[in-house]
Image (spheres, rainbow, N blue to C red):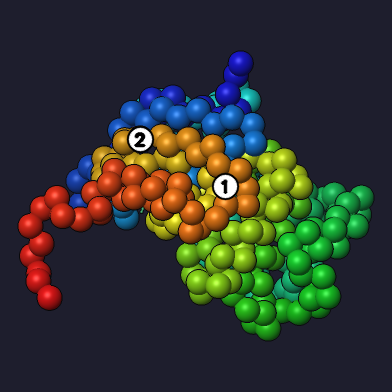
Amino acid sequence: MVSKIKFENVTKIFTNPDGEEVHALNGVNLDIEDGDFVCLIGPSGCGKSTMLRILAGLDKPTEGAVYINGEKITRPNYDRGLVFQDPNLFPWLNIHDNIAYGLKTRHIYKKDKDKVGQFMELVGLSGFEKSYPHQLSGGMCQRAALARALIGEPNALLLDEPLGALDAFTRMNMQDELLRIRKEKNMTMVMVTHDVDEAVYLANKIVVMSPRPAKIEEIITVEHSYPRDRNNDEFIALRSRILKVLNFAGKEKEAEYYI
Ligand SMILES: Nc1ncnc2c1ncn2[C@@H]1O[C@H](COP(=O)(O)OP(=O)(O)O)[C@@H](O)[C@H]1O
Ligand SMILES: [Mg+2]
């Protein structure tokens, strides 16, 4: 069977303005199946966003390739929706028009305009059509960004720390929203996060990455059904296991501080 998304030996080398080479990814291989919720987790600067940008078609690998449904990715396309940490809404457009923007640029707004209301409802924003981004909370703006990405009916939703700027309670609510949308739309999701709990709560596949040049340290399959209980023993054991792979479990080396 062809995997839905396949990273094949992906290496990415950037060149700094002073000519120095930065090896961001080093021979990354990863298979993502239909309906997977994959979380990429690893230290800052290890190449998580680079992986997602290559998958989005915004960047090209130096070596190797990424395939979606067997086809090599060379540019962005509507089959992959993108959500970043910053919702990036147009401040001069109301929420309805922000969400409708992609339909208009594709000249399918006339045919699909009813979808705007449907997707606003899907993300829980009904009634805020006429509001402007500055009138909404951070969580609501991120819901609008989600609706904008989903309205193109992508095959896969790519999320780069989408909940990173939200407060803890809003963040947990949005995690449940993502799971609900995924179930309703039967969608593949690939999400970058640096929050171990978030990854254990959401993903069925957790890809733990090493420091730069990033390679995949371990792929952990999470079999637990949804909704997950953040307090049960298996959840806590999984969290400890990931922290260990990331070398944050403590005790291994002498601490440089004592309290
Ligand atoms: N356009 C670029 N030019 C030069 N270096 C880059 C560029 N984009 C990313 N990098 C470098 O590649 C490495 C990985 O970056 P990134 O994928 O953003 O990391 P992460 O998302 O895991 O924090 C970092 O060292 C970063 O500085
Ligand atoms: Mg990043």
Which quadrant is home to the C terminus? bottom left
Q: Taking 173 as reference, is 134 above or below it?
A: below
Residue assigned mark 1: 158
Residue drawn at x 59%, y 59% as measured from the top left: 175
Q: Taking 10 as reference, is 15 above or below it?
A: below
**Do we see residue 46 in this rendering?**
no
**Residue 110 percent coordinates (x, y):** 91, 54
| Residue 138 quadrant | bottom right
Q: CA distance from mark 2 to mark 1?
A: 20 Å
**Residue 77 percent coordinates (x, y):** 64, 40
Q: Secondary structure at mark 2?
A: strand
30, 19: nearer the viewer: 30
* Residue 64: image tag: none
176, 165: nearer the viewer: 176
Q: Taking 224 as reference, is 134 above or below it?
A: below
**Do we see residue 171 in this rendering?**
yes
Residue drawn at x 52%, y 49% as measured from the top left: 191
Dot 1 amino acid type? Leu
> Is 198 placed left or right of 4 in the picture?
left
Instruction: Give the number of marks.
Output: 2
Dot 2 amino acid type? Glu
Residue assigned mark 2: 218
